[in-house]
Image (cartoon, grey):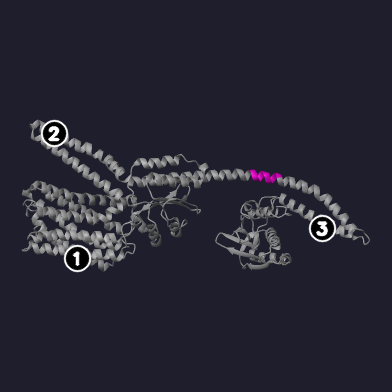
């Protein structure tokens, strides 16, 4: 038969376990509230509920360890502890009833009348229990009071479970479902209330009550199993919170158990030494014990917590140091994509994550591991300023727009980390993990932010380096173009005078009625005129653009230009479609812009003239808040992808008889207006040149 002190100590130890668990959960929630400062009432309801649960079980454990002389009604310590045990339970049940309406994604904000009824009953029940426990009010039938009290708890528990099933999602716990309730939560809470019910029914079956078992009599096996069921109920009730923060709660609980066990062993050893020592030695042992507990255990706690977290969850500062060391080894010369890829790979490897995706604001995506990038991209607005500017995880997903939060939870995303530097916000990183890695401690939150900041600075370096290289290339290209322009001007000047003289002579000879070789003279004149046009194009390329800035109705300009080119388009057999509304006005040089449009239309006509397929040309004018776009789209053969980047280079042409200056001059003209020329040729969709001007 187990001795009574051992049963009492075992019962106290079992009660200590849910006390530690609830203390760790409350501490985790408090850190979340203090650091993240969440919006909405959810966290404000959750923290007092968890703190009161911890207080309830701690008071229960202390009551079990009181000496027999203090465990009786009328003793101030017993009455106060009993009140601290019972009243928090009443308040926690009311808070939980409120909590289950706020927690699910499909939450229902309770009305004021509902809140008044819920907390009004709580106040009445808590006051009645407190007055009875303190002995201010007495009852002739304690058993009836116990039945009514526990009946109230079980009815409220049934309503809580009903709401969890009604509002929660189906299934078991998932890493991405931290912010939502699930069927598993309802099962765990139902089992918890069942344990509480059993801990009440078991003593009643033996014609006693749980309070009577706490009084000055010895702890029997009946009392032990009653207290064990009570502790099990507390653990089951905490399960939904524990599984959502395993990485925080379990190391804290394990550390607490080790510290309590170590302190108990030290005190027991000191007691054995004191029992065999004289008065002077007892004082020394007492001082040494206090010093060891005060100076040794407190500093050792942080080390012990880190060691346990590393063993259980691979947590620790070393893995973050590994990630930061890997990022420091990267260079901006590698490019933004390579840096993001290396960062994602190292995060997955070092942190034991399932996957990492990095979405940048320019649309680039880098992913590694198991993560549903497409599902995230569908709901995540990269340019929305409402997207979080700080790391969010777990319960914070509730603060996002509901479709976004639901999509992230469905994709098992456990954290979203902004990648931002003092210069700009680059994008966000998304983490997926299993339940063990679904939450991060305060230290890890700091480490995550440090890694993201380091990556952002690296991307800053990549951008600045790319800009420097682009400026160098632009300067070299400008110097090259200047040299080409000067040479072209000289060549054109030297050619133009003899060509002009030859053309004048040929014209005089062709006008003679009896002149021989009249047909040949016509060919000579046509070729000389072609040379003259080429020379004029060279001179235009060599000259600096001089623009006049006046309001230009772009739609009217497009329609007039198309009519000017109509003979050429009809000869090419092109069916022209115009979408050029009036009233879209830009500032610029109308004649220069007309020359650009003529060039684009003639290029399209040349492409369609030799095309055996459908010959369609569409010109469309569109306006946005920032730009005016004129798109010239033909249904011709298009251009190979490797040729597209070179089309605007001077003297490069995809046509056998082209000079390669038309698009180069057009681009320079558009850029002089503050716009740009964009060429695209999707496979099988012809060729499109878009002239974009500032609005």
Q: Report how far apart the C-alphas of labels 1 and 3 lie in the structure.
A: 102 Å
Do the numbered discs 3 and 2 sit on residues whose CB atoms are within 8 Å? Answer: no
In the image, residue 529 lies in the stretch drawn in magenta: no
For the residue carrying disc 2, how many other residues have a C-alpha within 10 Å: few (<14), some (14-19), or many (20+)? some
Residue 489, given in percent of the width and then of the height, sits at 75, 47
Q: Nearer the viewer, residue 155 or 375?
A: 375
Q: Nearer the viewer, residue 156 or 46?
A: 156
What's drawn in magenta, residue-wise?
Answer: 476-483
Q: Which of the 4 image quarters holds residue 562? A: bottom right
Q: Which residue is the extreme one toward the front? A: 1
Residue 538, given in percent of the width and then of the height, sits at 74, 51
- Please name the residue that numbered disc 1 is placed on: 155
- Is residue 136 left or right of 490 when viewed as pictured? left
Q: Secondary structure at mark 2?
A: helix
Majority secondary structure of magenta residues: helix
- Is residue 12 left or right of 361 when viewed as pictured? left
Q: Report how far apart the C-alphas of labels 3 and 2 lie in the structure.
A: 118 Å
Q: Nearer the viewer, residue 220 or 209?
A: 220
Identify the disc placed on residue 307: none
- Is residue 309 left or right of 53 when viewed as pictured? right
- Please name the residue that numbered disc 3 is placed on: 526
Residue found 84% across the figure and 50% down from its top? 498
- Is residue 667 left or right of 429 when viewed as pictured? right
All told, the count of numbered labels is 3
Mark 2 or mark 1: which comes first in sequence?
A: 1
Residue 95 visible in the picture: no
For the residue carrying disc 3, how many other residues have a C-alpha within 10 Å: few (<14), some (14-19), or many (20+)? few
Residue 348 visible in the picture: yes
Give the vertical position of 332 relative to 154 (above or below).
above
Q: Report how far apart the C-alphas of labels 2 and 1 lie in the structure.
A: 53 Å
- Please name the residue that numbered disc 2 is placed on: 285
Residue found 8% across the figure and 35% down from its top? 275
């Amino acid at each position: 038969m187990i001795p009574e002190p051992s049963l009492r100590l075992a019962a106290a130890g079992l009660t200590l376990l849910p006390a530690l668990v609830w203390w760790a959960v409350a501490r985790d929630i408090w850190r979340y509230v203090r650091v993240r400062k969440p919006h909405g009432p959810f966290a404000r309801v959750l923290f007092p509920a968890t703190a009161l649960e911890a207080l309830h079980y701690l008071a229960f454990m202390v009551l079990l360890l009181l000496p027999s002389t203090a465990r009786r009604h009328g003793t101030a310590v017993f009455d106060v502890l009993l009140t601290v045990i019972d009243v928090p339970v009443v308040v926690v049940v009311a808070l939980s009833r409120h909590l289950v309406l706020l927690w699910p994604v499909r939450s229902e904000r309770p009305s004021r009348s509902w809140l008044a009824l819920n907390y009004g009953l709580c106040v009445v029940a808590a006051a009645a229990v407190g007055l009875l426990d303190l002995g201010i009010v007495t009852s002739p039938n304690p058993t009836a009071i116990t039945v009514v009290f526990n009946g109230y708890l079980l009815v409220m528990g049934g309503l809580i479970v009903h709401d969890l099933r009604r509002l929660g999602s189906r299934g078991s716990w998932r890493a991405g479902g931290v912010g939502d309730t699930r069927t598993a939560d309802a099962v765990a809470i139902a089992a918890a209330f069942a344990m509480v019910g059993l801990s009440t029914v078991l003593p009643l079956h033996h014609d006693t009550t749980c309070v009577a078992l706490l009084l000055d009599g010895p702890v029997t096996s009946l009392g032990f199993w009653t207290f064990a069921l009570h502790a099990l109920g507390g653990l089951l009730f905490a399960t939904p919170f524990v599984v959502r923060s395993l990485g925080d709660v379990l190391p804290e609980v394990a550390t607490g158990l080790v510290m309590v066990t170590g302190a108990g062993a030290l005190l027991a050893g000191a007691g054995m030494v004191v029992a065999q020592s004289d008065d002077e030695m007892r004082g020394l042992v007492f001082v040494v014990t206090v010093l060891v507990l005060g100076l040794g255990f407190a500093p050792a706690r942080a080390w012990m917590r880190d060691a346990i977290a590393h063993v259980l969850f691979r947590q620790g500062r070393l893995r973050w140091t590994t990630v930061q060391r890997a990022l420091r080894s990267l260079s901006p010369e590698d490019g933004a994509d390579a840096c993001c890829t290396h960062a994602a790979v190292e995060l997955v490897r070092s942190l034991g994550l399932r996957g990492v995706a990095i979405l940048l604001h320019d649309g680039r995506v880098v992913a590694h591991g198991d993560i549903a990038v497409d599902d995230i991209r569908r709901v995540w607005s990269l340019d929305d300023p409402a997207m979080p500017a700080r790391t969010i995880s777990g319960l914070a997903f509730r603060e996002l727009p509901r479709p976004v939060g639901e999509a992230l939870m469905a994709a098992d995303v456990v954290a979203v980390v902004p990648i931002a530097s003092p210069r700009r916000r680059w994008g966000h990183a998304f983490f997926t993990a299993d339940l063990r890695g679904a939450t991060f401690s305060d230290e890890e939150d700091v480490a995550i932010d440090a890694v993201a900041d380091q990556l952002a600075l690296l991307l800053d370096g990549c951008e600045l380096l790319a800009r420097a290289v682009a400026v160098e290339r632009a300067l070299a290209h400008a110097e090259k173009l200047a040299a080409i322009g000067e040479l072209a001007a000289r060549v054109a000047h030297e050619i133009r005078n003899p060509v002009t003289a030859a053309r004048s002579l040929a014209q005089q000879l062709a006008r003679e009625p009896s002149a021989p070789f009249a047909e040949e003279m016509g060919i000579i004149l046509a070729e000389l005129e072609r040379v003259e046009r080429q020379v004029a194009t060279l001179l235009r390329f060599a000259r600096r653009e001089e623009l006049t800035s006046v309001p230009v109705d772009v739609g009217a300009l497009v329609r007039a230009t198309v009519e000017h080119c109509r003979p050429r388009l009809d000869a090419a057999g092109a069916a022209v479609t115009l979408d050029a509304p009036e009233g879209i006005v830009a500032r610029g040089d109308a004649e220069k812009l007309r020359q650009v449009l003529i060039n684009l239309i003639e290029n399209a006509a040349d492409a369609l003239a030799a095309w055996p397929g459908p010959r369609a040309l569409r010109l469309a004018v569109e306006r946005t808040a920032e730009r005016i776009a004129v798109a010239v789209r033909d249904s011709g053969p298009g251009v190979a992808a490797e040729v597209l980047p070179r089309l605007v280079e001077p003297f490069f042409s995809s046509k056998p008889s082209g000079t390669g200056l038309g698009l180069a001059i057009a681009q320079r003209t558009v850029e002089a207006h503050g716009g740009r020329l964009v060429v695209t040729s999707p496979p099988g969709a012809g060729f499109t040149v878009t002239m974009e001007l500032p609005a």
